[in-house]
């Protein structure tokens, strides 16, 4: 994260901001998975937005990585610009 004197913190990478009434805004990191077919199941590998290491998960959704980072594991929305 870098600081901009006029605008405040500038976040790099994909994120979503959500805010409940009376709560601080929460910035949610998103990691894009790569499907990995193992002998017993399909797993999802993703580069962690915090430590930049690869982590593997067995399902999509909100994840807590081994390094302690919290992010949402989801595929990119392919419907943008579709005819």
Image: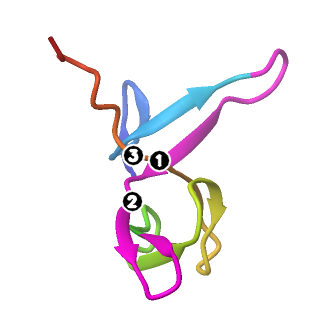
Circles 3 and 2 in contact, beta carbons < 8 Å: yes
> Which residue has dot 1 on it?
74
Residue 65 appears at what percent x and percent y? 60, 72
Near mark 2 (Cα within 10 A), the count class, few <14, some 14-19 or many ≥20, is many
Q: Residue at x 65, y 73 (%)?
A: 68
Mark 3 secondary-structure assignment: loop
Q: Residues within 10 Å of mark 3 (few under 14, many from 20)?
A: few
Determine whether label 1 and label 3 are within 8 Å by CB: yes
Residue 25 seen in this snapshot? yes
Q: Position of residue 3 (x, y in %)?
A: 38, 43
Q: Is residue 24 magenta?
A: yes
Q: Give the residues in magenta.
A: 20-44
Residue 33 is labelled as 2
Residue 13 picture location, percent across and down: 33, 46
- Count of numbered tags: 3
User: Which numbered dot is residue 75?
Assistant: 3
Mark 1 residue crowding within 10 angstroms, few (<14) / some (14–19) / many (20+): some
């Amino acid at each position: 994260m870098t600081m901009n004197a006029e605008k405040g913190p500038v976040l790099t990478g994909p994120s979503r901001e959500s805010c409940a009434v009376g709560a601080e805004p929460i910035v949610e990191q998103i990691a894009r998975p790569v499907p990995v077919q193992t002998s017993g199941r399909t797993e999802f590998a993703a580069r962690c937005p915090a430590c930049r290491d690869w982590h593997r998960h067995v399902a999509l959704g909100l994840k807590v990585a081994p390094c302690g980072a919290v992010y949402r594991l989801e595929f990119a929305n392919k419907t943008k610009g579709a005819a």
